């Protein structure tokens, strides 16, 4: 929890009653800034000449929003309770299926519910399945829990293809979000309305999940993660703590699934399948599972990678794999951990001395990356691209992958860049260690 | 009866293939605690290597060379990758192998293409060996059984009769003590990882032409191998063996037994119509849920016995 503790205002029992409560704005400005960015973001991509929003950007932003809820709900289990789940997507997807059926029922007139509140149906569905699956899975912890959730994930994914009634088989369940029932009189026929609906739900869910970490249950979850035997001695039943966390996590995952159903108007079996669960794990780990904010950053990065890079490259999964390997090897605390590592140096006010070393590492790093990307793209275009009839072009210039020159250039960039990077990285390391020692000497390191 | 015998033989073949894949993972998992997602990728690599090697020098050298290549790759992964990640915890190791699995799949796609390669059974073994009640039993299946049985015996001998095997066995349960006695535990880890990967590669060599050699074969095989390992229990090769055969037999028999819960209930005098609640669930025929049975068994056994069938330690 070190990253979280760093970002929290340091209030100990002894000083709590003397420090006056900080003004709301000063304490929560990053949150408000994030909301402001979320609100204005679509307008940067607004096409003023045609007066239309960019559909691609809106969908991507909406995806980031709902995946944020999903990743945070995953982290309620992984980061906060120490439960690694391989089947978290079943709660998300089942919430989505419930929502799709609810929307269809509203359309048919069998149910009255304004569209704004429809994600709640997903939440209740997620809660229901969270109780059902959580009751069984939370009997165990650690690897046994992980394996049970994996089994459940595979079961539900296979069932989704098998049972037509609820899951709609391979075609999934299609629905229509324009039900004509709304509290605000919005039709939700255009994607910007849906985006703002998602933003509102994201804010509500993030605030609720943040507050949940401060409740006794949230604190006990941390205790059960760190030392479940001690938690037992204090008189808590770790199993029940795990169960409640799983349930609540299911509720939020279900809301995310509900938003998914509203956004895409179709729910298919990939929402419950293993790759969806993996996305949550990856986003959480890349962002940093230790704190509360990590998964949000991780989600933004992963969704950008997914929707951005997958458009550009056939081999985007390979880049994702390389990114994970680099992250687990060099930044096990995720992005938040990386930022947090700079705190002692920032505290002694010498952060700017790292600027030059950073730039010196960045240049060869960029070279190496270009070399890798070029090699991968060349290879992928000779086999996969050729079979799809695509041609590689860099900046409008066609590159013939059959000639040796592009390969030599790419390999040279990789080798020289790599060699250069090694040298610069060693220099960076020395500078970093020296600054850290300084910080320790001044007592700024914790 | 004929269905029974043929399915029994096929189930044995599939079960032994599973055992070859999962025995390595059991050793790796129990010893190092690594949930190795790239294990099934080694299976895929074994099949693809064997395909390429057999194009040039034939199937028999490939049977030796492809697993060796896989073993070398495994050793490199352990020495230069996993060992460094180890200090960052189990989830980091798991994600490392997951990233590796993604990379291997993509590299395989880039090298051999997106569609299945024509990796065929060698001509020398491509004939029906004998027939049971009119159904031919293919010589290649007998060969698979032979290879897996040989492998089983040699693993067993290596683990119980050699010095290294005894150290490995000791490291399964008491790694710290083995280290304290002066054995080079990291080297044992590398050895086990390489050996396990080579076994997976061997399974790929003989399984790739039995099934289909395609880029998605790793992700199709991965979960079932986990199921076998966890079902059998950590630290127990015997448990792994039983679990492999059980899963192999279950999956094979489920395909031929065309019954559903509704049929069972009919015997008890309850008829299922489309208006009965859960009619759809009850009337699904067994062949369709055959692939699901291992997962159901996994969830059930972990709920009752978190150590698995014959596990010596908590998972």
Image (cartoon, rainbow, N blue to C red):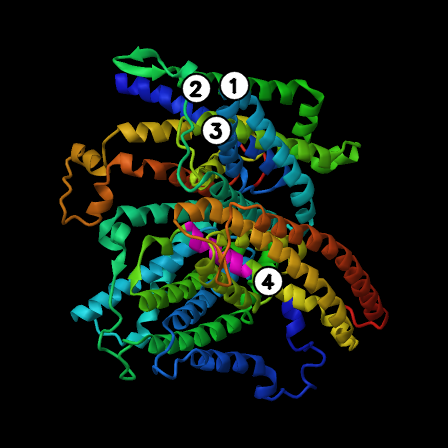
Q: Are marks 1 and 2 in contact (CB under 8 Å)?
A: yes
User: In the depicted view, which residue is nearer to us: A100 or A425?
Assistant: A425
Where disc 1 sits, the SS reads helix
Label for residue A288? 4
Determine which quarter of the picture holds residue B268. Answer: top left
Label 1 vs 3, first from the N-terminus: 3
Q: Are marks 1 and 4 in contact (CB under 8 Å)?
A: no
Where disc 2 sits, the SS reads loop
In the image, is A239 to the left or to the right of A181? right
Q: Chain of mark 2?
A: B
In the image, is A258 to the left or to the right of A88? left
Q: Which residue corresponds to mark 1?
A: B60
Query: Residue B122: in sight, yes or no?
Result: yes
Residue at 41 percent across and 49 percent down: it is: A153
In the image, is A47 to the left or to the right of A287? left
Q: Chain of mark 1?
A: B
Label 2 vs 3, first from the N-terminus: 3
Label for residue B122? 2
Up-down relation of residue B37 to residue A112 (above or below)? above
Of the two numbered discs 1 and 4 in the rendering, the one whose residue sits closer to the viewer:
1
Residues flagged by tags 3 and 4 on a common chain: no
Q: Are marks 3 and 4 in contact (CB under 8 Å)?
A: no
Label for residue B51? 3
Residue range of the region highlighted in magenta in the rendering? A274-284
* CA gap, disc 1 and disc 2: 9 Å
Q: Main secondary structure of the magenta part?
A: helix
Residue A102: image x %, image y %? 25, 66
Which quarter of the image is occupied by the N terminus of chain A?
A: bottom right
* CA gap, disc 1 and disc 4: 49 Å
Residue at 60 percent across and 52 percent down: it is: A372
User: In the depicted view, which residue is nearer to us: A21 or A275?
Assistant: A275
Residues flagged by tags 1 and 2 on a common chain: yes
């Amino acid at each position: 929890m070190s990253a979280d503790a760093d970002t929290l205002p340091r209030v100990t029992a002894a000083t709590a009653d003397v420090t006056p409560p900080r003004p709301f704005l000063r304490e929560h400005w990053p949150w408000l800034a994030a909301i402001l960015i979320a609100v204005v973001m679509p307008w940067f991509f607004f096409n003023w000449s045609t007066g239309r929003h960019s559909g691609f950007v809106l969908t991507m932003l909406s995806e980031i929003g709902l995946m944020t809820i999903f990743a945070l709900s995953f982290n309620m289990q992984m980061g906060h309770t120490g439960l690694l789940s391989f089947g978290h997507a079943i709660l998300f997807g089942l919430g989505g299926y419930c929502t799709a059926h609810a929307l269809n029922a509203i359309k048919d007139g069998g149910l009255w519910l304004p569209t704004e509140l429809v994600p709640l149906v997903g939440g209740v569905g997620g809660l229901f399945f969270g109780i059902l699956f959580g009751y069984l899975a939370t009997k165990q912890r650690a690897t046994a829990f992980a394996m049970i959730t994996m089994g459940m994930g595979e079961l539900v994914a296979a069932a989704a293809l098998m049972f037509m009634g609820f899951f709609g088989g391979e075609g999934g369940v299609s629905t229509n979000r324009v039900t004509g029932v709304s509290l605000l009189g919005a039709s939700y026929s255009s994607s910007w309305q849906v985006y703002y609906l998602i933003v509102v739900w994201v804010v509500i869910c993030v605030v609720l999940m943040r507050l949940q970490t401060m409740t006794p249950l949230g604190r006990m979850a941390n205790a059960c993660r760190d030392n479940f035997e001690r938690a037992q001695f204090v008189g808590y039943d770790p199993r029940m703590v795990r169960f409640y966390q799983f349930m609540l996590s299911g509720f939020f995952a279900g809301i995310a699934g509900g938003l998914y159903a509203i956004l895409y108007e179709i729910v298919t079996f990939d929402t419950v399948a293993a790759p969806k669960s993996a996305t949550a794990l990856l986003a959480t780990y890349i962002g940093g599972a230790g704190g509360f904010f990590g998964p949000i950053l991780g989600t933004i990065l992963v969704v950008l990678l997914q929707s951005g890079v997958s458009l550009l490259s056939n081999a985007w999964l390979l880049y994702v794999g390389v990114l994970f390997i680099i992250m687990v090897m060099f930044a096990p605390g995720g992005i938040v951990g990386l930022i947090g590592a700079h705190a002692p140096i920032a505290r002694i006010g010498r952060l700017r001395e790292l600027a030059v070393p950073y730039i010196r590492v960045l240049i060869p790093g960029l070279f190496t990356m270009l070399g890798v990307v070029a090699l991968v793209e060349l290879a992928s275009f000779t086999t996969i691209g050729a079979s799809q009839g695509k041609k590689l072009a860099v900046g409008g210039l066609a590159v013939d992958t059959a000639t040796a020159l592009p390969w030599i250039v790419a390999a040279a960039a990789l080798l020289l860049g790599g060699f250069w990077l090694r040298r610069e990285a060693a220099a960076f390391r020395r500078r970093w260690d020296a600054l850290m020692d300084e910080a320790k000497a001044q007592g700024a390191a914790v | 009866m004929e269905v029974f015998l043929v399915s029994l033989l096929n189930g044995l073949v599939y079960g032994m293939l599973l055992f070859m894949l999962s025995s390595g993972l059991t050793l790796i998992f129990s010893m190092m605690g690594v949930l190795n997602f790239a294990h099934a990728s080694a299976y895929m690599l074994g099949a693809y290597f064997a395909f390429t090697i057999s194009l040039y020098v034939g199937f028999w050298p490939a049977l030796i060379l492809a697993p060796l290549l896989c073993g070398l790759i495994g050793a490199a992964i352990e020495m230069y990758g996993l060992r460094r990640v180890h200090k960052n915890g189990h989830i980091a190791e798991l994600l490392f192998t997951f990233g590796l699995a993604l990379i291997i799949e993509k590299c395989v796609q880039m090298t051999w293409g997106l569609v299945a390669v024509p990796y065929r059974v060698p001509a020398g073994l491509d004939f029906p060996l004998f027939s049971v009640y009119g159904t031919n039993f293919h010589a290649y299946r007998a060969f698979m059984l032979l290879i897996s049985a040989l492998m089983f015996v040699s693993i067993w001998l290596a683990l119980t009769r050699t010095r290294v095997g005894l150290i490995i066995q000791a490291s399964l349960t008491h790694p710290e003590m083995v280290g304290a006695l002066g054995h080079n535990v990291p080297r044992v880890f590398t050895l086990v990882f390489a050996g396990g990967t080579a076994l997976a590669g061997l399974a790929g060599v003989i399984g790739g032409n039995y099934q289909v050699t395609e880029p998605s074969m790793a992700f199709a095989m991965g979960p079932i191998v986990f199921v076998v390992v966890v079902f059998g229990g950590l630290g127990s090769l015997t448990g792994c063996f039983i679990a492999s055969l059980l899963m192999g037999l279950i999956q094979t028999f489920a395909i031929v037994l065309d019954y559903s819960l509704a049929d069972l209930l009919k015997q008890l005098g309850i008829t299922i119509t489309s208006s009965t609640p859960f009619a759809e669930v009850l009337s699904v025929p067994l062949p369709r849920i055959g692939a699901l049975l291992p997962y159901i068994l996994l969830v059930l056994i972990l709920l009752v016995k978190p150590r698995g069938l014959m596990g010596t330690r908590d998972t």
